[in-house]
Amino acid sequence: TELFKFEERGDEILKLWGKNQSVPHQGSVSFAFRFPMELGMKIEATQLISRVNEKRKLKVGLVDFVKVAQLFNGLADLEARLLFLEAMAVDLNLKLSHVRYLSELDPVLRTDVVDRLLPAVPEINTLGGFDLAVTCGHHGASLVRDRASIVNLLLFNPACADGRYDFDVSEPAHRKMLDDLIIVNHWERDCAMKLGRPDLSKH
């Protein structure tokens, strides 16, 4: 409840939870997100994004990853594995080694694993990311032409996000870059407001 301000039905639902009474299964809840300014203003863009992701996603250690990998490997259906990859990308902070290992479990889905999970790595090693993108591609494929979204992600620098961007939100890498831009944009806007300076953000 620290980051969210519930209004109308939201307050009512919270009160019912506190009294251990039944909660409505239908209805609407509106909320307003307040950016966590306790992160401070003297912070680099990459650190800012990393800390926000720590608050929004689960960190995966070795023991946890073993369980995740076993669950993924136990899914025999292709669609089930793709759905599981989407869930992992949304909820987990992974390491490059995790993505590499999962890409080797299923040769058929190797490209899908990298495309979906590489954006879920908070701090991507650029050289390691390129190596993984190259090795998972099809024989004769062009990295720049066929894996353009991954290349853009690996070369993206949120600390110097100038110019204009054209995103395809169906691409996980583009969604990751868009998310990072929104985080940095909101943070810079709120820092400017706190210092009494004009808002120079685009959104």
Image (spheres, helix red, strand yellow):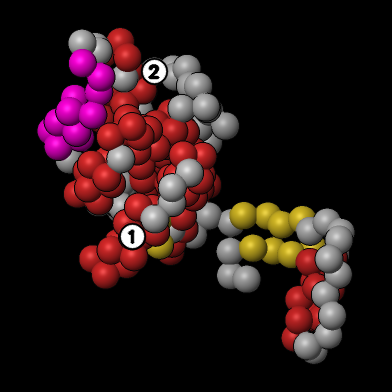
Residue 114 among magenta residues: no
The boundaries of the magenta stretch are 127-139
- Which residue appears at 20% of the width and 11% of the height? 140
> Which of the 4 image quadrants contains residue 11?
bottom right
**Amino acid type for the residue under numbered disc 2:** Gly
Which numbered tag is attached to residue 169?
none
The quadrant of the rendering that contains the N terminus is bottom right
**Amino acid type for the residue under numbered disc 1:** Gln
- Which residue appears at 48% of the width and 44% of the height? 77
Front in this rendered view, residue 97 or 2: 97
* Residue on which the image places disc 1: 70
- Residue 69 position, x and y percent, is 32, 56
Residue 131 among magenta residues: yes
- Residue 121 position, x and y percent, is 30, 46
> Please, is residue 39 above or below residue 191 in the view?
below
> Please, is residue 2 above or below residue 156 in the view?
below
Residue at the bottom extreme, as displayed: 19
Under circle 1, the secondary element is helix
Position of 60 with respect to 178 (left or right) is: left
> Please, is residue 14 above or below residue 152 in the view?
below
* Residue on which the image places disc 2: 163
Q: Badge 2 local density, few (<14 within 10 Å), some, or many (20+)?
A: few
Front in this rendered view, residue 67 or 191: 67
- Which residue appears at 35% of the width and 42% of the height? 117
- Residue 96 position, x and y percent, is 22, 46
Position of 6 with respect to 127 (left or right) is: right
Position of 3 with respect to 113 (left or right) is: right
Chief secondary structure of the magenta span?
helix
The quadrant of the rendering that contains the C terminus is top right
- Residue 101 position, x and y percent, is 22, 47
